[in-house]
Amino acid sequence: MRQRSKFASILTVLFLVTCAGIVSAAGLQDNRSLEEKTSRPIQEVQQQNLEESAKGIVTDYFNAIIKEGDAGGVTPLVAFSLGKVDISDSANIKVSVDLKYKDDNMELPSVDYSVVRVDDKYQVQKQVCIFDAIPGSPTKGTASCSKIFKHENGLMTVPGRK
């Protein structure tokens, strides 16, 4: 009987240690936005070539999006390539990006993404882009992009839309 009690005690301890490990791991989850996760400190960016740093930040951002895959029913991004970089305003660096989505045979126009200073870091500024692929549309093959703003109540909105 004593051996069963000892065995039960050991199992209980192992169970509690396992539960504590799971709770600890869950507490370590990174709740930062994708923009924050792929940001770089201002000092690091300023010590390197500004153009190459901006390209690196945008590359990290889009690689993370590709790694996420099909997020929320949105057609997943499968590839991207970087174009020209405009560093004329070091607080708002523009990087031209060509995007390729899964099962999309249409050639999409390049879209400019901004790498901006936020607090003590540079990060990609989130935006929503809508590509017109409607056959016969006079604007077919164009993109319309808007910056996303976060309100205090946590809702994300696009300027000019309710």
Image (cartoon, rainbow, N blue to C red):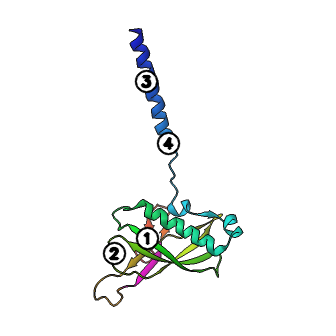
Q: Which residues are magenta?
A: 141-147
Give the CA distance from mark 3 to mark 2: 54 Å
Query: Which residue does the numbered mark 3 point to in the structure image?
Result: 12
Give the CA distance from mark 3 to mark 1: 49 Å
Q: What amino acid is found at the position of numbered circle 3 in the picture? A: Thr
Give the CA distance from mark 4 to mark 3: 20 Å
Query: Which residue does the numbered mark 4 point to in the structure image?
Result: 25
Q: State the image coordinates of residue 36 (x, y, percent, origin top left).
A: 55, 61
| 140 over 5 or under it: above or below | below
Give the CA distance from mark 1 to mark 4: 32 Å
Query: Which residue does the numbered mark 1 point to in the structure image?
Result: 79
Query: Dot 4, how many residues are within 10 Å of its Cα: few (below 14), some (14-19), or many (20+)?
Result: few
Q: What amino acid is found at the position of numbered circle 4 in the picture? A: Ala
Q: Earlier in the sequence, mark 3 or mark 2?
A: 3
Which residue does the image show at 42% across and 60% down from the upper left?
A: 68
Q: State the image coordinates of residue 17 (x, y, percent, origin top left).
A: 48, 30
Q: What amino acid is found at the position of numbered circle 1 in the picture? A: Ala
Based on the picture, tell me whether residue 142 belongs to the magenta stretch: yes
Query: Can you say which quadrant of the picture contains the N terminus?
Result: top left
Which residue does the image show at 42% across and 17% down from the upper left?
A: 7
Which residue does the image show at 43% across and 64% down from the upper left?
A: 66
Quarter location, residue 106 = bottom left
